[in-house]
Amino acid sequence: MPNTYTQIYIHFIFCVQNRLCLINESWENELYKYITGIVTTNNHKLIAINGMPDHLHLLIGIKPNQSISDLMQDVKGSSSKWINEQKFVRGKFSWQSGYGAFSYSHSQLDTIIKYIMKQKEHHKKKTFKEEYLKILESFKVEYDNKYLFNFLDY
Protein backbone atom coordinates (compact mmCIF):
# COMPACT_ATOMS: atom_id res chain seq x y z
CA MET A 1 0.00 0.00 0.00
CA PRO A 2 1.94 3.03 -1.19
CA ASN A 3 1.87 6.07 1.07
CA THR A 4 0.35 4.10 3.95
CA TYR A 5 2.48 4.24 7.08
CA THR A 6 1.50 2.43 10.24
CA GLN A 7 2.99 1.36 13.54
CA ILE A 8 0.61 -1.10 15.17
CA TYR A 9 1.80 -3.55 17.82
CA ILE A 10 -0.63 -6.11 19.21
CA HIS A 11 -0.04 -8.53 22.09
CA PHE A 12 -2.16 -11.66 21.56
CA ILE A 13 -3.01 -14.23 24.22
CA PHE A 14 -4.87 -17.47 23.52
CA CYS A 15 -5.30 -20.85 25.20
CA VAL A 16 -5.39 -24.53 24.45
CA GLN A 17 -8.98 -25.86 24.48
CA ASN A 18 -10.11 -26.43 28.08
CA ARG A 19 -6.74 -25.01 29.19
CA LEU A 20 -5.18 -28.45 28.93
CA CYS A 21 -1.39 -28.46 29.27
CA LEU A 22 -0.72 -29.96 25.84
CA ILE A 23 2.10 -27.82 24.45
CA ASN A 24 5.19 -29.87 25.19
CA GLU A 25 8.71 -28.46 25.44
CA SER A 26 9.87 -31.13 22.97
CA TRP A 27 7.94 -29.45 20.13
CA GLU A 28 7.08 -25.93 21.31
CA ASN A 29 9.94 -24.33 19.30
CA GLU A 30 8.66 -26.03 16.14
CA LEU A 31 5.21 -24.60 16.92
CA TYR A 32 6.67 -21.13 17.42
CA LYS A 33 8.47 -21.37 14.05
CA TYR A 34 5.29 -22.57 12.36
CA ILE A 35 3.25 -19.69 13.81
CA THR A 36 6.00 -17.25 12.80
CA GLY A 37 5.62 -18.55 9.24
CA ILE A 38 1.86 -17.98 9.32
CA VAL A 39 2.32 -14.41 10.56
CA THR A 40 5.04 -13.68 7.99
CA THR A 41 3.01 -15.17 5.14
CA ASN A 42 0.24 -12.73 6.07
CA ASN A 43 2.72 -9.82 5.75
CA HIS A 44 3.00 -9.08 9.46
CA LYS A 45 6.06 -9.27 11.72
CA LEU A 46 6.21 -11.61 14.69
CA ILE A 47 8.31 -9.79 17.27
CA ALA A 48 8.03 -12.17 20.25
CA ILE A 49 6.41 -15.54 20.93
CA ASN A 50 6.44 -17.64 24.08
CA GLY A 51 4.07 -19.37 26.38
CA MET A 52 3.20 -22.14 28.72
CA PRO A 53 1.85 -25.65 28.13
CA ASP A 54 -1.70 -24.25 28.17
CA HIS A 55 -1.44 -20.82 26.47
CA LEU A 56 0.61 -18.61 24.15
CA HIS A 57 1.62 -14.97 23.96
CA LEU A 58 2.49 -13.32 20.64
CA LEU A 59 3.62 -9.77 19.95
CA ILE A 60 3.01 -8.90 16.32
CA GLY A 61 3.70 -5.80 14.27
CA ILE A 62 0.44 -5.63 12.32
CA LYS A 63 0.03 -4.31 8.78
CA PRO A 64 -3.40 -2.92 7.90
CA ASN A 65 -3.87 -5.47 5.10
CA GLN A 66 -5.74 -7.93 7.34
CA SER A 67 -8.12 -7.71 10.26
CA ILE A 68 -7.01 -8.92 13.68
CA SER A 69 -9.79 -11.50 13.75
CA ASP A 70 -8.81 -12.91 10.34
CA LEU A 71 -5.18 -13.16 11.42
CA MET A 72 -6.11 -14.97 14.64
CA GLN A 73 -8.40 -17.33 12.74
CA ASP A 74 -5.52 -18.18 10.41
CA VAL A 75 -2.94 -18.54 13.22
CA LYS A 76 -5.15 -20.69 15.42
CA GLY A 77 -6.76 -22.74 12.64
CA SER A 78 -3.57 -23.46 10.70
CA SER A 79 -1.47 -24.19 13.79
CA SER A 80 -4.03 -26.57 15.32
CA LYS A 81 -4.29 -28.40 12.00
CA TRP A 82 -0.49 -28.64 11.85
CA ILE A 83 -0.26 -29.93 15.45
CA ASN A 84 -2.81 -32.62 14.62
CA GLU A 85 -1.00 -33.59 11.39
CA GLN A 86 2.27 -33.91 13.33
CA LYS A 87 0.47 -36.09 15.91
CA PHE A 88 2.11 -34.18 18.76
CA VAL A 89 -0.84 -34.96 21.05
CA ARG A 90 -3.16 -37.89 21.54
CA GLY A 91 -6.63 -37.12 20.32
CA LYS A 92 -7.57 -33.85 18.66
CA PHE A 93 -5.77 -30.62 19.49
CA SER A 94 -7.64 -27.32 19.30
CA TRP A 95 -7.35 -23.80 20.63
CA GLN A 96 -10.07 -22.38 22.83
CA SER A 97 -12.37 -19.92 21.07
CA GLY A 98 -11.56 -16.29 21.62
CA TYR A 99 -8.33 -14.47 22.38
CA GLY A 100 -6.99 -11.36 24.00
CA ALA A 101 -5.55 -8.58 21.81
CA PHE A 102 -3.90 -5.57 23.44
CA SER A 103 -2.15 -2.67 21.72
CA TYR A 104 1.20 -1.22 22.72
CA SER A 105 3.20 1.78 21.61
CA HIS A 106 6.72 1.56 20.23
CA SER A 107 8.12 2.92 23.51
CA GLN A 108 6.59 -0.04 25.39
CA LEU A 109 8.07 -2.78 23.20
CA ASP A 110 11.09 -3.61 25.37
CA THR A 111 8.87 -4.09 28.41
CA ILE A 112 6.29 -6.31 26.69
CA ILE A 113 8.97 -8.37 24.89
CA LYS A 114 10.70 -9.09 28.21
CA TYR A 115 7.35 -9.97 29.76
CA ILE A 116 6.52 -12.42 26.96
CA MET A 117 9.97 -14.00 26.92
CA LYS A 118 9.93 -14.61 30.69
CA GLN A 119 6.59 -16.43 30.80
CA LYS A 120 7.93 -19.56 32.47
CA GLU A 121 9.49 -17.56 35.33
CA HIS A 122 6.42 -15.31 35.55
CA HIS A 123 4.06 -18.26 35.98
CA LYS A 124 6.00 -19.63 38.92
CA LYS A 125 4.44 -16.71 40.84
CA LYS A 126 1.11 -16.07 39.08
CA THR A 127 -1.57 -18.26 37.59
CA PHE A 128 -2.79 -17.66 34.07
CA LYS A 129 -6.12 -16.45 35.46
CA GLU A 130 -4.39 -13.88 37.70
CA GLU A 131 -2.24 -12.76 34.77
CA TYR A 132 -5.12 -12.44 32.30
CA LEU A 133 -7.46 -10.63 34.69
CA LYS A 134 -4.68 -8.18 35.59
CA ILE A 135 -4.14 -7.42 31.88
CA LEU A 136 -7.87 -6.91 31.30
CA GLU A 137 -8.07 -4.60 34.30
CA SER A 138 -4.94 -2.63 33.39
CA PHE A 139 -6.38 -2.01 29.90
CA LYS A 140 -9.78 -1.20 31.45
CA VAL A 141 -11.48 -3.88 29.35
CA GLU A 142 -15.00 -4.64 30.49
CA TYR A 143 -15.65 -8.38 30.51
CA ASP A 144 -18.23 -10.94 31.50
CA ASN A 145 -16.87 -13.90 33.47
CA LYS A 146 -18.98 -16.35 31.49
CA TYR A 147 -17.14 -15.36 28.29
CA LEU A 148 -13.61 -15.57 29.67
CA PHE A 149 -11.38 -18.53 28.91
CA ASN A 150 -12.34 -21.74 30.68
CA PHE A 151 -10.16 -21.37 33.73
CA LEU A 152 -9.14 -24.58 35.42
CA ASP A 153 -8.14 -24.48 39.04
CA TYR A 154 -5.06 -26.55 39.72
Image: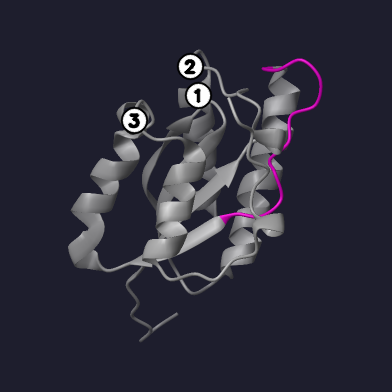
Q: Is residue 98 magenta?
A: yes
Q: Which mark is residue 28?
A: 1
What's under tag 1, amino acid-wise?
Answer: Glu
Residues at marks 2 and 1 touching, judged by CB atoms closer than 8 Å: yes
Cα gap from disc 3 to disc 1, whole angstroms:
22 Å
User: Which secondary structure lies at badge 3?
Assistant: loop
Q: Amino acid at mark 3?
A: Lys
Instruction: Give whichever of discs 3 and 1 has the lower sequence position.
Output: 1
Secondary structure beneath dot 1 equals: helix
Residue in the picture at 32% in, 72% down: 7
Could you tell me residue 97's position as x and y percent?
Answer: 71, 50
For the residues bearing labels 2 and 3, Cβ distance under 8 angstroms: no
Sequence-first disc among 2 and 3: 2
Q: Is residue 53 visible?
A: yes
Q: CA distance from mark 2 to mark 3?
A: 20 Å
Percent x, y of residue 5: 33, 80
Q: Does residue 130 belong to the magenta stretch?
A: no
Instruction: Please tell me in which quadrant of the rendered image residue 11 appears.
Output: bottom left
- In the image, which is nearer the foreground, mark 2 or mark 3? 3
Q: Main secondary structure of the magenta part?
A: loop
Q: CA distance from mark 2 to mark 1?
A: 5 Å
- Judging by the rendered image, the residue that carries numbered circle 2 is 25
Residue tagged 3: 125
Do residues under tags 3 and 1 come within 8 Å of each other at their CB atoms?
no
**Nearest the camera: 88 or 124?**
124
For disc 1, the neighbor class at 10 Å (few under 14, some 14 to 19, many from 20) is some
| Quarter occupied by residue 96 | top right
Query: Which mark is nearer the camera, 3 or 1?
Result: 3
Amino acid at the residue labelled 2: Glu
- Which range is magenta? 88-99
Q: Residues within 10 Å of mark 2 (few under 14, many from 20)?
A: few
Q: Residues within 10 Å of mark 3 (few under 14, many from 20)?
A: few
